[in-house]
Amino acid sequence: MLIFTYDFNRKVVIGSLEFDMDFGFLNSLQQNIFGKIVITICTISAIGIFIIDILFSGNCDYYIDILTKKIHYSDGKWKFKREINIDFDKIKNVVLIENMVTGEEGNKIYSYQIDVYDAELNAYKLYVLQDYDMANNIAKTLGEIVEAEVIDWTHIENYEGFIKRIL
């Protein structure tokens, strides 16, 4: 349990750590019990959010194994890791999609996303790039590797289709 103590020499002690504080607002908060409770709740919440972020992060990695003819996905960390393997035989399409978001001052920012659809129309996002030519070349190369049809849906902004997005 963390214990906050305050002395009037502007020192804050948290457990066995000692900090020199010279902030007027924090000093006034630490002089009453309500302030100590607020600081304790904020500190414990920040540590909890940090731990949850580490455990449940969307750390999506993938690689294409040409020898076994599979795409291997791993999402998450530690015991919360989810792994998905897709055979090249089950891949139906490689799809190039254009996404548009409105940036600052109302200007449009375009990105190009490369998805892999399997036979059940599950979508697996592989790349998000800013350059159309590079995205198109990668999609064509990927289509040749997995022996699937490449579909260019960049003429429709923010197209998602009738899919179940997996990753």
Image (spheres, rainbow, N blue to C red):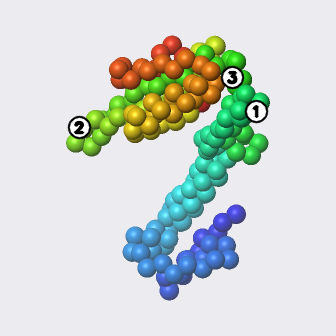
Disc 2 marks a residue whose amino acid type is: Gly
Q: Which residue occupies 40% across, 27% down?
A: 98
Disc 3 marks a residue whose amino acid type is: Phe
The residue indicated by pointer 1 is: 67
Q: Is residue 160 above or below residue 82?
A: above
Mark positioned earlier in the residue sequence (3 or 1): 1
- The secondary structure type at the circle numbered 3 is helix
User: Quadrant of the rendered structure where residue 143 is?
Assistant: top right
Where residue 112 sits in the image (x, y, percent)? 42, 32
**Front-most of residues 145 and 92:** 145
Disc 1 marks a residue whose amino acid type is: Leu
Q: Is residue 147 above or below residue 77?
A: above
- The secondary structure type at the circle numbered 2 is helix
Where residue 53 sits in the image (x, y, percent)? 60, 48
Q: Is residue 129 left or right of residue 76?
A: left
- The secondary structure type at the circle numbered 1 is loop
Between label 3 and label 2, give the one nearer the viewer: 3
User: In whole angstroms, how far apart are the C-alphas of marks 3 and 2?
Assistant: 41 Å
What label does residue 106 carry, if any? Answer: 2
Asked whether the viewer can see residue 105, the reply is yes
Q: Which residue occupies 67% across, 73% down?
A: 15
Where residue 97 sits in the image (x, y, percent)? 44, 25
Mark 1, other Cα within 10 Å: few <14 / some 14–19 / many ≥20: few
Q: Are marks 2 and 1 in contact (CB under 8 Å)?
A: no
Between label 3 and label 1, give the one nearer the viewer: 1
User: In whole angstroms, how far apart are the C-alphas of marks 2 and 1?
Assistant: 47 Å
User: Quadrant of the rendered structure where residue 18 is?
Assistant: bottom right
Q: Are marks 3 and 2 in contact (CB under 8 Å)?
A: no
